[in-house]
Image (spheres, helix red, strand yellow):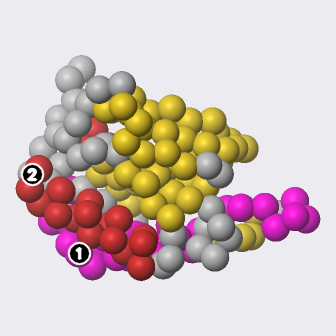
């Protein structure tokens, strides 16, 4: 699994001009599921993100995690994170999981976040979405369940 994690002041996602997910201060997570990913990978990545110490502690240090801090998280499916652009000009998505598997693990990831007591909003899987956000910091992190980066 791959995730782009952004600390935001607020974020929302629309499908067909209708807001389907919206949060105030918290995290916007773009999530992609790769071939070979598992429920365990979804749980581990959710745990990692819920406990990332990237919020201000009031002393100017990023040392407070999302979990237990009263912040929200918006998760948007984004298979293009597996786009391989090393050859040619057209991305290759061969490493992305097929839609049925990706949906199952995306939902497992969301459920894992909720199990930490987090308020979780989502986009709509396999829909064309418009995502609007106001970054905070900016703080943007790349995570990969295989720890490639």
Residue 139 horizontal/vertical position (percent): 65, 48
- Name which residue lies at 11% across and 50% down: 99
> Disc 1 designates what residue?
39
Considering depth in this image, is 2 or 77 the residue closer to the camera?
77
Identify the image quadrant of residue 84: top left
Q: Which segment is the magenta one?
A: 34-60
Q: Does residue 128 show up magenta in the picture? A: no
User: Residue 25: x and y, percent?
Assistant: 65, 51
Whether residue 80 sits left or right of residue 112 in the image: it is left
Q: Is residue 29 above or below residue 56?
A: above
59 magenta-colored: yes
Q: Residue at x 26, y 60 (%)?
A: 106
Residue 145: where, in percent of width, then height? 35, 66
Q: CA distance from mark 2 to mark 1?
A: 15 Å
Q: Badge 2 is on which residue? A: 98
Sort mark 2 into few (<14), some (14-19) or many (20+) by Cα contacts within 10 Å. Answer: few
């Amino acid at each position: 699994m791959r995730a782009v994690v952004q600390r935001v002041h607020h974020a929302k996602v629309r499908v067909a001009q209708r807001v389907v997910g919206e949060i105030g201060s918290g995290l916007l997570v773009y999530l992609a599921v790769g071939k070979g990913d598992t429920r365990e990978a979804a749980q581990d990545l959710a745990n990692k993100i819920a406990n990332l110490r990237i919020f201000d502690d009031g002393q100017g240090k990023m040392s407070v995690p999302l979990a237990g801090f009263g912040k929200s998280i918006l998760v948007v499916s984004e298979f293009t994170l597996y786009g391989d652009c090393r050859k040619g000009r057209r991305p290759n998505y061969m490493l992305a999981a097929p839609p049925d598997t990706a949906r199952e693990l995306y939902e497992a990831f969301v459920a894992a976040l909720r199990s930490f007591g987090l308020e979780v909003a989502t986009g709509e899987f396999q829909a064309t979405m418009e995502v609007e956000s106001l970054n905070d910091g900016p703080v943007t992190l790349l995570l990969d369940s295989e720890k490639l980066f």
